[in-house]
Image (tube, rainbow, N blue to C red):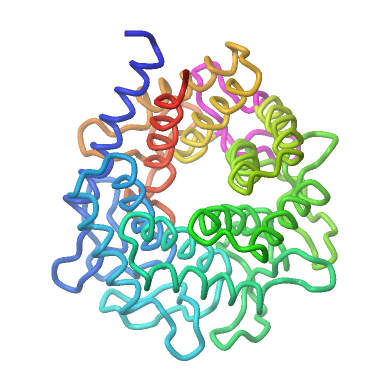
Amino acid sequence: MNRLQQFKKELQAELNDILAYWMQYSPDKKNGGFYGKIDQENRIIETASKGGVLNARILWSFSAAYNCTKEEKYLAYAHRAFGYITAYFIDKEFGGIYWSVNYKGEPEDEKKQIYALSFLQYACSEYYQSTKLEAAKKLAIDLYCLIEQYSFDVVQTGYLEAFTRAWQPINDLRLSSKDANEKKTMNTHLHILEAYTNLYRIWPEAVLHQSIVLLIKNFTDHIINQNSWHLNLFFTEDWKVKGDIVSYGHDIEAAWLLLEAAEVIKDEKLIEELKDIAVKIAAATIEGLDADGGLWYEKEEGHFIKQKHWWPQAEAMIGYFTAWQITVLPTYLAYSLNSWQFVKNKIIDKEKGEWIWGVDEKDKPMEGEDKVGLWKCPYHNSRACIELIKRIKALP
């Protein structure tokens, strides 16, 4: 068996293991849906808040796993996620999705974070591909319309971050406490693009095509630093760059998601442009690779944040594989395989299941982090497995 077939075989086993963990531990059998928090020792925090992003990512992961494997067991958990989201997370008065509900399913943080809307749209499009359920397609299209109505900046283009429950301006726009409080961010634009790309697969309308092309232009005009080939992270409303943090995981994730968007809308000119950009971004992230194959988290003021979180490793597996497919340079395939080797050695929890949050510079697991939480979801790691399984299958 050659190494790509071995890679695929290992990824198929890992996808099964990741989702087996979520099927075993995460369903909340008392209050419905899924628990909001499970710690690194697999202790369930029954009264933890339930996050909109977590639930959308669970819906996407099980839908995508079913679409990849056709294993019926995954569909049951996608149904569970969609049922809970539509019952408890959808704001029936103002539209959109709450950022969080409490463990009983009552609205908690009611703000409209566009990042969360885009993840639910992404997930509903995937779920529709699994089920052909018209309610899922309608919700995905409704979320697109809400984002365009309230978040799209008709003057400067791009998308504004967040609003109150009733779509009024809000003072705190941040996704999390570590983010800058700015009107526009790379992160939200990246995941709107990802969501719109998936929606286009089931709803290939001209208006959506136009939105995707304009989003790609936002990246090439404002978000990608054409000197360093890293991504700028935070912006004022008129696209002035704020701060100089480099996020290696987002860099390598954007490299392949931008190209995927151009491929899905079948724009040949953009495909060629974004192949070139994908390789340039991948080359720029190499500085963030450690000798063990792991990717450092961030660089701030010229210094590495000496942590290796789980999700940049998953994105590196796909991003470097993409660069190899474009260039056929064996170094990029080696980086992808090395990322997987690092994950196997340091990130997969062989005793308790799933992937740990990350390790520090001494390879010690980071303390006090979640196994399941607002941000710790089955999305990055299951997606890396699914994406690479599909790509290896498609190779000549």
Residue at position x 24%, y 37% from top?
A: 16
Q: Residue furthest bottom?
A: 93
- Whether 85 is drawn above or below 341: the answer is below
Residue at position x 64%, y 44% from top?
A: 266
Q: Is residue 289 magenta?
A: yes
- The answer to which quarter of the image holds residue 235 is bottom right
- The answer to which quarter of the image holds residue 331 is top right
> Residue 173: x and y, percent?
64, 71
Q: Is residue 345 left or right of residue 157?
A: left
Q: Nearer the viewer, residue 129 or 373?
A: 129
> Which region is colored magenta?
286-306
The quarter in which the N terminus is drawn is: top left
- Whether 210 is drawn above or below 370: the answer is below
Q: Is residue 55 left or right of residue 142?
A: left
- The answer to which quarter of the image holds residue 38 is bottom left
> Residue 202: x and y, percent?
48, 58
> Residue 323: x and y, percent?
62, 25
Tally of numbered discs = 0
Residue at position x 75%, y 49% from top?
A: 219
Q: Nearer the viewer, residue 363 or 194?
A: 194
Q: Residue furthest left?
A: 30
Q: Is residue 114 magenta?
A: no
Q: Nearer the viewer, residue 219 or 43?
A: 219
Q: Is residue 283 left or right of residue 253?
A: right
Residue at position x 43%, y 34% from top?
A: 359
- Whether 6 is drawn above or below 214: the answer is above
Q: Nearer the viewer, residue 382 or 200?
A: 200
> Residue 269: x and y, percent?
76, 39
